[in-house]
Image (tube, rainbow, N blue to C red):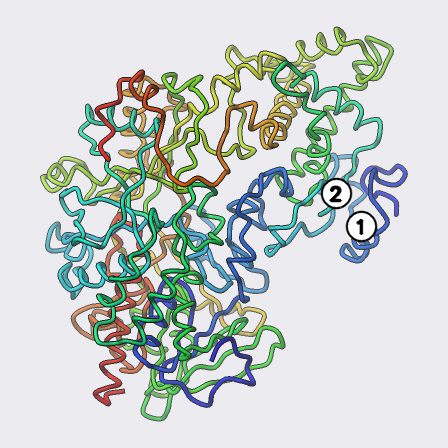
Amino acid sequence: MSDPLRGGGPPARIDRRLAIKWILAAGAGALLVDPLSLTAAGPAAVPGTGYGTDPAMTRPNRPGDCWPLTLSEAERRDVAALCDVILPADDRSPSASQVGVPDFIDEWISAPYPSQAKDRKAITEGLDWLRGASRARFGAAFADATAAERLALCEEIAHEAPTGSELEVASRFFRRFRNLTSAGFYTTPVGMKDLGYVGNVPLATFDGPPADLVAKLGLTGEVGW
Amino acid sequence: MAFVTPSSTAEKYDVIVVGSGAAGGQAAYTLTMDGAKVLMLEAGRNYDPVSETPMFQTPDQAPLRGVATPDKPYGYFDATVGGGWTVPGEPYTNQSQDESRQFSWWRSRMLGGRTNHWARHALRNGPYDFKPRSRDGLGFDWPISYEDVAPYYDKVEMLIGVYGQNDGLENTPDSPEGCLLPPPKARIGELLARQRARKLGIPIVPIRRAVLTRPLDHARIPARLHPGNAKAQRILAEDMRNRAACFWATNCGRGCSIRANYQSTTVHLPPALATGNLDILTDAMVREVTVDASGKATGVAYIDKKTGVGHSVLGRVVVLAASACETVRLLLNSKSNRHPNGIGNSSGLVGKYILDTVGASWGGQIPLLESLPPHNEDGAGGLHVYAPWWLYKEQLAGKLGFARGYHVEFGGGRGMPGGGAPYTPDTGGRTSFGPGMKEEARRYYGSHMFFSGRGEMIPNEDSYCDLDPKVVDKWGIPVLRFAWKWSEHETRQAAHMQKTFADWVEAMGGVNKAKPEADGSKAIQAGGKVIHEVGGTIMGADARSSVTNSWSQTWDARNVFVADGGVFASNADKNPTLTIMALAWRAADRVLDEMRRGNV
């Protein structure tokens, strides 16, 4: 099964079972893609029907379960490197790529929904820009550039670029990619713990906020029930 | 009796109930506990909240971290299955291309209907809310008063379990002793909001929600609800023992596998099934109420969605509880010689005066809530406090520029992260990233608050639905066509909400995320989006000006009742579900009474 959107070899990380399921689900999916949409308007939404209105919610999902992932290996390496510039490991938590954020981003931009399709365009264009800029400046893919080089390139596009300027697309991409990285990271148990989210456990009683915190904020008089 | 198939339904039932949500569940409960043989028809599939609810799943176990998609508009783990703003093969249309004149229709095709999705807010209408026209000259008075409904509010609260507190506030009724469960403690941001709201004159009190903060009193409540009915008492006591109290985790919107909150499938249907008097047929799309030559209903005709084959079934009484607008559709599609324009439509009013709730939202970031010590704020899986409407006197004196009130639902804090916007503020046009971003996230997480106004809409001539003359659904049943218009009473109210919320955020020392809209038409949510669809078959004092009488019984066919929100003659700011259940119980009492008297 060739990937109708990326034009290259087989899509990354689709096992045989899933590929067969997908061919059956999509029918003549490849034929439904307008080839013009790949050039003039950028990549179209991935064909497919999503998970439907009645998915098995209690069954854990892994990226790639509902629709195939579509990033190439080279793109995935750049995505992982960029994720880790954005959320590196520190003494409290691992980096974004260590908790599977690149899989999430691949799942996101490969999804057959309109809002994700918009991101697919922004992200793939941005990754193209990143690869080109990195090669031009450092003579290497982004993932193979030094840490200092990667940081410098990101710092450049982290600033809002004026409309119509050369960096406008890149800076918009960076903002969007950063938001996705943040969403991907802080929705994992590791990311939640890093934030100090300590819920999602059954309790015998709900006692409200700690009394010393209530007192510190001058709210003791508000605790009426 | 239990779950049946088209070939195993009985020949004839005492009552056919169309719909399985708050109205259908309550009607079936009341009827079967008193011995009536009932068939419940549900257009969606069977659904088992005990085995199907994703309780402790984290977003990383869902596709796209669980964010909303067209397939699951309220997020992957929202309990709604087989429903949403669109249902494949079951379209609806709008008369206008203008988005501000369109109505969005949320449907839930599953056992339990929209009770699977709701916020569990269980507010009583107050005395003003049943007589709004007498108070300000607008809209319609109901043919019943608060005193008529109050005993049913009491009963529903005891049956389903509602937490809250009596605060003695204007038009915000207290409940008698023994009706309410204790409210949960307020969270830290709620305490701060409460303190700072006082300067603005806004009262903050515990909200009322259908969540068990302690087990129900199974030794006492069954006798109060079913005096003289030993079998009903025994069944209810047994069922109440099987409902656990909240364990202070997981959002109620996912449903509740331990049955700590109310949904029809965990509260109304189990005891109703236990009576042996209830048959439930799912995947049954009712197309019309059938009638005899005299115009009296004989039962319903439906499509078995699994096979596409049409069937009909007989009943002495038909109770429509399909949701306000779906009930309109059913009545309009029930045409016969005696009812040429549909049952209940001799007044020409079926489909008129549909209503939603006025909604406007707001957000702010509160520096006082930054970098707080980690503590568990999951609580009861929803709101703990709210602000009931507080400007009744100013409004009546004409000082506000809009005629009806709103309440405020608000919160925030340290809930489970959900894949939304980052916590960082991105100051100076720089996208924050790197080691500093983790520090910022730790600092800002928990410091964001949201505010949602929920206000009363006044019925108007431009908000209605009828049958689309051209479009049918996949079974060939004519579909609804909507027309919608907010009046200035609603848009000005929406602007007032945003202005109030912005002042409130400032009073909390916070940072507003935007400037409030002076033009309320830009602040107000689109029609239907709050999913408080009521009206369309309003009750009234006479057959000329209403579709049903004060007992929710259609004027045109004495054995056809409307148990859902369709009968609402006004839509108070209070969330409609508790009132739907109270009126459904009341209508079911009337059905039993009419059957006993041989009137139907």
Which residue is painted at 83% across and 52% down in the image? A17
Check disc 2: other Cα within 10 Å, few if <14, some if 14-19, many if 20+. many
Above or below for A187 versus B212: above
B181 with respect to B117 (left or right)? left
- Mark 2 highlights which residue? A64
Q: Nearer the viewer, residue B239 or B130?
A: B239
**Residue A89 visible within the image:** yes
Q: Nearer the viewer, residue B64 or B500?
A: B64
- Evaluate whether label 2 is on the same chain as label 1: yes
Amino acid on which disc 2 is placed? Gly
B495 with respect to A191 (left or right)? left
Quick one: which residue is furthest to the bottom in this view? B293
Q: Position of residue B565 (x, y in %)?
A: 32, 62
Name the chain letter of the residue that bears numbered label 1.
Answer: A
State which quadrant residue B414 falls in: top left
- Mark 1 highlights which residue? A18
B490 with respect to B4 (left or right)? left
Above or below for B268 versus A103: below
